[in-house]
Amino acid sequence: MKIFIGSDHNGFQVKHSLIEYLGRAGYEVEDKGDLKLNSEDDFPEFATHVAMAVLGSNDADARGILVCGSGQGMCMAANRFKGIRASLVWDRQEARLTRNDNDSNVLCLPAKAIDVNDINIIVETWLNTPFAAAPRYIRRNKQLDELL
């Protein structure tokens, strides 16, 4: 599984902690920016980089992780892309549900609201929860992709 990760300045430290954690766990991770701490950067740029990378990846199970202060902005920006199902997640239960029910392919995290140790647990849960692929879930995801 290829993981593309991005953050603005508010999520910069969390992103780097996650890159180290995921690398030690054996995941292939690609940093889509920001590559240096810049207090003037804007989250839509990095949400775009990650969304486009997930959509353009040769890996059928490519995933994205986005981190900003609240997670809200990244989630709104990523969900502008057809085929992206970005989810704002703040605990393990939400991580499990969004994968199981919604086949979320982009995880959005609020750097200012979650402890780094909890983030690792959330990310592992999200990465390791399979999509249930129930007919109603498949139907709903198809409906999402058909929205304008």
Image (cartoon, grey):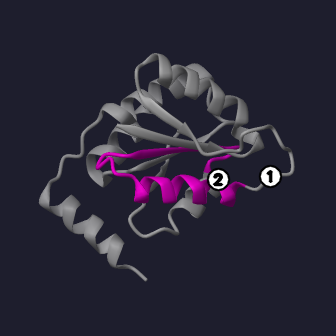
Residue lying furthest top in this view?
Answer: 24
Q: Where is residue 113 in the image (x, y as percent from the top left)?
A: 66, 35
Q: Where is residue 42 in the image (x, y as percent from the top left)?
A: 76, 56
**Which residue is pictured at 40% across the width and 21% down the height?**
26
Q: Residues within 10 Å of mark 2 (few under 14, many from 20)?
A: many
Q: Which mark is residue 46?
A: 2
Q: What residue type is labelled 1?
A: Asp
* Label tally: 2
**Which residue is pictured at 47% across the width and 46% down the height?**
64
Tags 1 and 2 touching, CB below 8 Å:
yes
Is residue 85 visible to us here? no
- Whether residue 116 is situated above or below residue 9 in the rendered picture: above
Q: Which mark is residue 41?
A: 1
Residue lying furthest front in this view?
Answer: 58
Residue lying furthest left in this view?
Answer: 135
Q: Position of residue 148 (x, y in %)?
A: 43, 83
Q: Where is residue 60 in the image (x, y as percent from the top left)?
A: 29, 50
| Residue 60 is a magenta residue | yes
Q: Residue 72 carries which label?
A: none
Q: Is mark 1 on a helix, strand or loop?
A: loop
**Which residue is pictured at 27% across the width and 45% down the height?**
100
Q: Which of 2 and 112 is in front in this view?
A: 2
54 left or right of 102 in image: right
Bounds of the magenta segment: 43-71
Q: Which amino acid does label 2 sit on?
A: Phe
Q: Which of 82 and 97 is in front in this view?
A: 82
Q: Which of 134 and 62 is in front in this view?
A: 62
- Whether residue 112 is situated above or below residue 25 in the rendered picture: below
Quadrant of the image occupied by residue 74: bottom right
Whole-number angstrom distance, CA of label 1 to CA of label 2: 9 Å
